[in-house]
């Protein structure tokens, strides 16, 4: 872990492994999305946003800007979530 450079948010190792559930409800566009960094929890919340790509997908999908959705009940072996926390120096 941490063998590559951090991204612009100071986070390491954010791409690959599994597609990641995020807190946002899915919407076709960003019209009406919160502009302060909060999760978008209005709209069709049966569909939740998935980010990035996985070991199973095409290399071009392995980027955090890759955004699509799955129904909340969906599961498979290349879908998960990421826990993150700040480590004190």
Image (cartoon, helix red, strand yellow):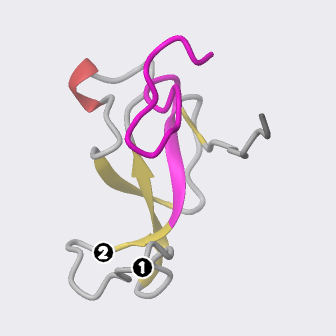
Q: CA distance from mark 2 to mark 1?
A: 17 Å
- Left or right for 24, reference 81: left
Looking at this view, is 82 or 38 the one in front? 38
Looking at this view, is 62 or 10 the one in front? 10
**Which label number is shown at residue 17?**
none
Question: Which mark is first along the chain, 1 or 2?
Answer: 2
| Residue named by callout 1 | 36
Image quadrant holding the C terminus, namely: top right
| Helix, strand or loop for the magenta stretch, by majority | loop
Q: Is residue 6 above or below residue 2?
A: below
| Residue named by callout 2 | 27
Q: Is residue 86 magenta?
A: no
Can you tell which quarter of the image residue 15 is in?
top left
Looking at this view, is 72 or 14 the one in front? 14
- Left or right for 39, reference 35: right
Crowding at dot 2, Cα within 10 Å, few <14 / some 14-19 / many 20+, comes out as some
Name the secondary structure under disc 2: loop
Q: Which residues, given as a range, are shown in magenta?
A: 1-23
Looking at this view, is 25 or 88 the one in front? 88
* Residue 37 point in image, percent of width and height: 45, 72
Name the secondary structure under disc 1: loop
* Residue 62 point in image, percent of width and height: 33, 28
Residue projecting furthest to the front: 89
Image quadrant holding the N terminus, namely: top right
């Amino acid at each position: 872990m941490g063998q590559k450079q951090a991204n612009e948010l100071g986070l390491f190792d954010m791409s690959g492994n599994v597609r990641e559930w995020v807190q946002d409800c899915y919407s076709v566009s960003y019209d009406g999305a919160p502009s302060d960094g909060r999760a978008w929890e209005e709209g069709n919340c049966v569909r939740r946003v998935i980010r990035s790509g996985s070991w199973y997908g095409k290399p071009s999908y392995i980027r955090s800007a890759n955004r699509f959705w799955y129904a909340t009940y969906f599961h498979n072996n290349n879908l998960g979530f990421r826990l993150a926390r700040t480590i004190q120096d």
